[in-house]
Amino acid sequence: MTSIATATGVRVGVDIGGTFTDLVVARSDGRLLVSKVPSTPDDPGAAVVAGLADLLGRASIAPRDVIEVVHGTTIASNAILQKRGARTGLLTTRGFRDVLEIGRIRTPDLYDLAWDKPVPLVERRWRLEVDERIGADGAVVRPLDPATVVAAADRLVAEGVDVVAICFINSYLNPVHERRAQELLRARFPALEVTASCDVLPEIKEYERTSTTVVNAYLLPIMRRYLEALTAGLARIGIAAPLLVIASNGGVVSARAAARRPVFCVGSGPAAGVAGAARLGTVAGARDLIAFDMGGTTAKASLVERGRVSLTSEYEFREGMSTPSRFIKAGGYMLKVPAIDVAEVGAGAGSIAWIDAGGLLRVGPESAGAVPGPACYGQGGERPTVTDANVVLGFLNPSWLAGGELPLHAARAREAIRTHVAAPLGLSLLEAAHGIRQVANANMARAIRSVTIERGRDPRDYTLVAFGGSGPVHAVDVARVLEIRRALVPVLPGVFTAVGMLASDVEHHVVRAHASPLAALDAAAVGTLVAALLEEGRATLHAEGYDDAGIRLELQADLRYVGQGAELTIPFAGDRLDADGVETLRRAFREEYAATYGYATDEDLELVNVRLVATGRRPSRLDFRALDVTTTPAGPTHRPVAFDRGGGLVNTPVLGREAVGPAPRRGPLILESYDSTIVVPPGAAVATDPCGDLVLTLDA
């Protein structure tokens, strides 16, 4: 096997968005080549294969020289949103058939009397009980009855179920019954896909474990088929390199691991951008950041503090604004998996503007997507979008989007806004376009507030890092809404998520339950458990080609106050928890609890789980200090731009991004590059930092 530490060659980052698929090719000499191609929603991998073949051909790179393809995918999240997953059955302990229905007995909004629960991904008729019981201490209370397992499987298969999830009470302590049920199902129906909670989430909490296992089962066939098809497509153009997938925690896993446990990749796309922003901020000297990613369909926000991404151990995937569920419960499908703390709202460049029944202007969450796309694309779209508003206001150059590869039709944008917004509301064309932009900005600011103010953080203390195809177009306006005074636009902002993938490390998360009050912790038992975790982490990374020098192992403890139902995850050093280690954990927990909830007490704590984050550090990962990007700069020109509502048009200089240097330049100014447009309005200035990033400063 070729050692990861010595492998050299061409690496590829791929990010599939709702409108564009972004491709980044990194040569071994540090040079980057980029391309944006329209996404192909019916077959997402088709855009990847065709776009990559074209990019490699134009760069005279042989496909055999590609040694790695790192991929962020929305296949899993889209399957949940569109209810396109597999026909799923559930085997559970007698008496626990309705765990998914009961959930947490909460609502996301106390005063919303019209709220409906999300429809379970498994219909009740396919949630079947079997005779077995494991006690709270892990002992067998009632042996598994194989006849009930076989009978349930016969019924599910007869009714056309494609995949079966198994989740028995207390199996996280003793998986013997789940293992036996798996054996019975696979022996009777070899073609039936089966997933058990002991392989997905061996943790306490029955609802969370059941929901996570069911989501994993629901996604198994579609993710497996997709990754197999993409691998085959890459092979057809001569690429035999391994396919890696970004996980929800921002790390990288193999395609095989992603196909086996797709629930860990539901947040794949947004995670890579945040992880890249964290590494960029460390290099750029800005360790406290708000990552703001505005693409074609959604806008995402996440917090980076002291150079580290904000991780959560659970979140709820839902329509509308998806946020980690530390404070808001029951609004979506519970996923108890490590994930970057990302808030996502349906306000992207392709989001459609519409007027609701009360006569109010709304933007999103419906998107024009890649097909037919915004009206200005000229591909059949007739409804106005945020992109159409930006064309009408002059922010976007109709002949320069994607380096001039995608000409825009300004007349169609004007007609769409005039017909669907301006005329019905009695507004001028520019007023209507400003209204669309302002509503979109307000929606995006709401997502940022959810990861800052609602987490006890003041957004004014952070630098806004704006990326995505439209992030730099809206960055200053969104920053002003939140009174943020500094924004950072990285090199290649429009494809930055794909760039971030090439800066990610391989990560594996392993967890073991160990419930005990800290005051009565058995240090020897914890030491044995920790040793097993460390050995598993090393063995996993050794099998993937990493030597000990390239492996980093971090231990974490899930802690809570005695009697609470939610935990905080706290890192700890060393391979055992002696008296000093326990006291250090107590202090760290109280500090984090106070930062999260605004207060902390001296009450007793209890340990719930011990976790291991096993990281394979990629020596060849992207270095933001040494990027060599070949672009085609826009020529200097001017065009009229409407920056403020009622302010009229301003004849604004339009320059290539390369025209900006370390000396600040005052707005108004429009900067254009292949992958994005950067808007510097009046009252703001822009300069470059030593890494080539653009730093925008706003007047007080």
Image (cartoon, rainbow, N blue to C red):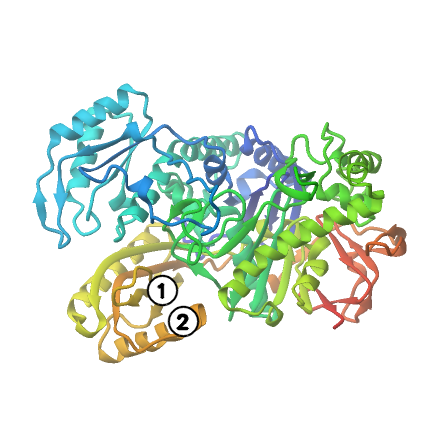
Q: Position of residue 540 (x, y in %)?
A: 31, 52
Vertical arrangement, residue 616 with respect to residue 145, above or below: below
Residue 174 visible here: yes
Crowding at dot 2, Cα within 10 Å, few <14 / some 14-19 / many 20+, comes out as: some
Q: Earlier in the sequence, mark 1 or mark 2?
A: 1
Which structural element holds mark 1?
strand
State the image quarter where residue 432 is shown: top right
- How many numbered tags mark residues here? 2
Which residue is pictured at 40% across the width and 75% down the height?
591
Q: Position of residue 20 (x, y in %)?
A: 64, 40
Work out which residue is located at the far bottom of the displayed protein and give it. Answer: 580
Residue 237 visible here: no
Q: Nearer the viewer, residue 203 or 14?
A: 203
Q: Can you tell which mark lies on residue 175?
A: none
Which residue is pictured at 84% across the width and 52% down the height?
642
Q: Are marks 1 and 2 in contact (CB under 8 Å)?
A: yes
- Residue linked to disc 2: 592
Vertical arrangement, residue 534 with respect to residue 375, above or below: below
- Residue linked to disc 1: 568
State the image quarter where residue 155 is shown: top left
Which residue is pictured at 34% across the width and 78% down the height?
587
Q: CA distance from mark 1 to mark 2?
A: 8 Å
Q: Nearer the viewer, residue 483 or 465?
A: 483
Q: Is residue 181 left or right of residue 5?
A: left
Task: Give the amino acid at mark 1.
Answer: Leu
Vertical arrangement, residue 138 with respect to residue 83, above or below: below
Q: Position of residue 289 (x, y in %)?
A: 58, 66
Q: Nearer the viewer, residue 219 or 53?
A: 219
Task: Give the amino acid at mark 2.
Answer: Glu
Which quadrant of the figure contains the C terminus? bottom right
Q: Is residue 521 left or right of residue 356?
A: left
Crowding at dot 1, Cα within 10 Å, few <14 / some 14-19 / many 20+, comes out as: some
